[in-house]
Amino acid sequence: MSARPIPVPVPSPEPAVTVPAAFGGRPLFSEPVPMVRPTVPEPDEWLDRCARMLASGQITNGAAVRELEQAVARSLGVAECVAVSSCTSGLMLVERCLDLRGRVIVPSFTFFATAHSLLWNGLEPVLVDCDPHTWNIDPACVRRALDRLPGVSAILAVHVFGNPAATEELEQIAREAGVRLIFDAAHGFGAWRSGRPVGGFGDAEVFSLSPTKLLVAGEGGLITTRDPDLARRLRAARNYGDAGDYDCRFLGLNARLTEFQAGLALGSLPLVAHGLERRSALAACYESWLDSQPGITLQRSSPDDRSARKDFSLVIDPVRFGVSRRVLQDALTQENIQTRRYFDPPLHRQRLYRRFRRPEVDRLENSEALSRGVLSLPIYPLLSDCDAGRIARRILEIRAWICPTRPVT
């Protein structure tokens, strides 16, 4: 299947705008700039594949699903890939098939679906802090939790915003403690850790195929693992626990991926490389404006790593920057720029998870600080470098109008 390059729109020349909309100027963009736009194949290509699926008479868990699993396994250099209905269901099934019991260490700074999978399996989340630079789970906090709490059976780490977690150190910790290691890789497709693709670390990694991700199926998930026996159990688990003889050996659920979703993902797979290139370029544009600004903190990656750049996020310190996150977000909304506050509140301040907070294990100070200040900006291949630069400059113009002593530089 050939992949056509995605055209990057060139904005039409506009008069220089220096007065933000919040202060009486006209909006920077006449139409809303979304947080994300999914990267999908050409309609004719997609419809042709759909027609073949309909003609085959098999529209779920068929040839396209197998083709997707094989293509992803080759792309990521892993032994096994199992397609499922969502990243969340994938996490639930991995935890069930690994027969986890008791407690599981998980970061508080993550999307709630990460921990939801634990509760659905009757497991107790042990909430730990993140590294202040990478924003991923802090291995030192994992060690401390293992030392202080009995009954931990696994570590569930996350590649936050597509930035690879400290996989090698976490694998060593898991080996020494005799516990399982799972990665919520929802954001991580296309990321590399020390020259290796994310997907082959721990006991299993679970990706999302939802519209905000680099590889898109509408909805869906992928589980990658080096363990053929685990993959065999997962394939039965996604089909209620039926391995094919109508005699269930354990409790599964309906987590099958449809042929249409698999076909969309197959059409999107050749576009991932271009998507990574564009996201990296857009991140560089944002960083060129914002990285040196007092009161703005950006997520850091190791020089040997490649982030998938699922999101581009900054953390605002209102005292040093001179503008609160809320005021900045409201002002950007008036410019027709969509933003989001991931992950605020963090898990330990959500009503469902407050009871799991253990100050004696972890005070979660970094998660608190990040969640109070994080703001994610638009990033997707169809956004031009020019427009990313305009968004970054407008952030500084908003600050300059609120704090005249801090000009745009």
Image: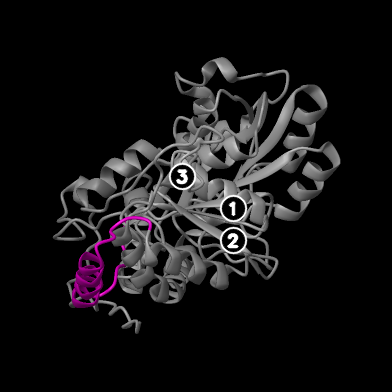
Q: Which residue is mark 2?
A: 80
Residue 222, position in %: x, y? Answer: 48, 55
Q: Mark yes or no: residue 356 visible.
A: yes
In the picture, residue 73 is in which quadrant? bottom right
Left or right: residue 1 compared with residue 315? left
**Left or right, 231 with reference to 269:** right
Q: Assess whether residue 130 is covered by the magenta stretch.
A: no
Q: Amino acid at mark 1?
A: Ala
Residue 98, placed above or below residue 232: above
Counting residues from the N terminus, which is met first, the one under dot 3 or under dot 2? 2
| Quarter of the figure with the N terminus | bottom left
Left/right placement of residue 265 relative to residue 230 reads: left
Residue drawn at x 40%, y 62% as measured from the top left: 65
Mark 3–mark 1 distance (CA, rounded to whole Å): 11 Å
Q: Which residues are magenta?
A: 36-61
Identified by mark 2, the residue type is Glu
User: Where's residue 402, x and y in %?
Assistant: 33, 44
Q: Residues within 10 Å of mark 2 (few under 14, many from 20)?
A: many
Residue named by callout 3 = 238
Q: Secondary structure at mark 2?
A: strand
Cβ–Cβ under 8 Å for marks 3 and 1? no
Looking at the figure, which quarter contains the C terminus? bottom left
- Say if mark 2 contacts mark 1, CB within 8 Å: yes
Q: Considering depth in this image, is 23 or 252 the residue closer to the camera?
A: 252
Q: Is residue 37 visible from the viewing direction of this image? A: no
| Residue located at (67% from left, 27% from top) | 101
* Real-space CA distance between mark 2 and mark 1, rounded to the nearest whole angstrom: 6 Å
Q: Earlier in the sequence, mark 2 or mark 1?
A: 2
Q: Which mark is residue 231?
A: 1
